[in-house]
């Protein structure tokens, strides 16, 4: 018989660095989930992504057992890594803080394709480029789908 899901918990946790401190402890503890078991399983599953911010969706069942699904790192975090910046621009339409190329945008779009609400690589690239622009990054070069 299938387990009944009681609640979904969405968190962003650094890979391989989950611990019972906030925000994980209070979020899971209030739902009756074994916090240390989650931390051990999450850290074991994310050893290769050490230090990267990873979104995780935790399904908590009626019997207080749980499963979790690890998503790909947010596009904004990947863009900041590529542009070698600490944070985006406070005024993105005026102050530009870095540059990324269309090839880099394509790499991020391919990585995020499973988590994005897009059917084609082109639309995924447009979404990632929009995120870059809203952070104050300039996307250099010519868009692959642009006419000559």
Image (cartoon, grey):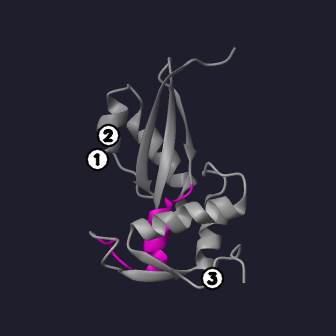
Task: Measure the alpha-carbon separation of dots 2 and 1.
Answer: 5 Å
Q: Residue at the location (49% across, 78% down)?
A: 82
User: First in sequence: mark 2 or mark 3?
Assistant: 2
Residue drawn at x 33%, y 75% as measured from the top left = 86
Element at label 2: helix
Q: Residue furthest front?
A: 148
Q: What residue sits right under mark 1 in the picture?
A: 21
- Residue 85 horizontal/vertical position (percent): 37, 78
Q: Which span is picked out in magenta?
A: 72-89
The local secondary structure at tag 3 comes to loop
Disc 1 is placed on an element classified as loop
Kindly identify which numbered label has been placed on residue 25: 2
Contact between labelled residues 1 and 3, with CB atoms less than 8 Å apart: no
The disc at residue 142 is: 3
Figure quadrant of residue 23: top left
Vertical placement of 46 versus 140: above or below? Answer: above
Q: Is residue 83 visible?
A: yes
In which quadrant of the rendered image does the C terminus lie? bottom right
The image shows a total of numbered marks equal to 3
> Residue 48, located in which quarter of the rendered image?
bottom right
Q: Which quadrant would the N terminus be assigned to in this image?
A: top right
Which residue is at the front of the view, 18 or 55? 55
Membership of 90 in magenta stretch: no
Verify whether residue 74 appears in magenta.
yes
Tell whether label 1 touches label 2 (CB within 8 Å).
yes
Query: Quick check: 62 above or below 116?
Result: above
Disc 3 crowd rating (10 Å Cα; few below 14, some 14-19, many 20+) is few
């Amino acid at each position: 018989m299938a387990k009944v899901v009681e609640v979904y918990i969405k968190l962003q946790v650094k890979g391989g660095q989950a611990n019972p401190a906030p925000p994980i402890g209070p979020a899971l503890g209030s739902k009756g989930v074994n916090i240390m078991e989650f931390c051990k399983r999450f850290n074991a599953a994310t050893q290769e992504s050490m230090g990267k911010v990873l979104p995780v969706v935790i399904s908590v069942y009626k019997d207080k057992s749980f499963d979790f699904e690890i998503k790909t790192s947010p596009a904004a975090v990947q863009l900041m890594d590529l542009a070698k910046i600490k944070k985006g621009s406070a005024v993105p339409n005026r102050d530009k803080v870095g540059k990324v190329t269309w090839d880099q945008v394509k790499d991020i779009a391919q990585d995020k394709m499973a988590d994005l609400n897009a059917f084609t690589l082109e639309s995924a690239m447009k979404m990632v480029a929009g995120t870059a622009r809203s952070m104050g990054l300039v996307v250099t070069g010519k868009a692959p789908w642009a006419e000559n």
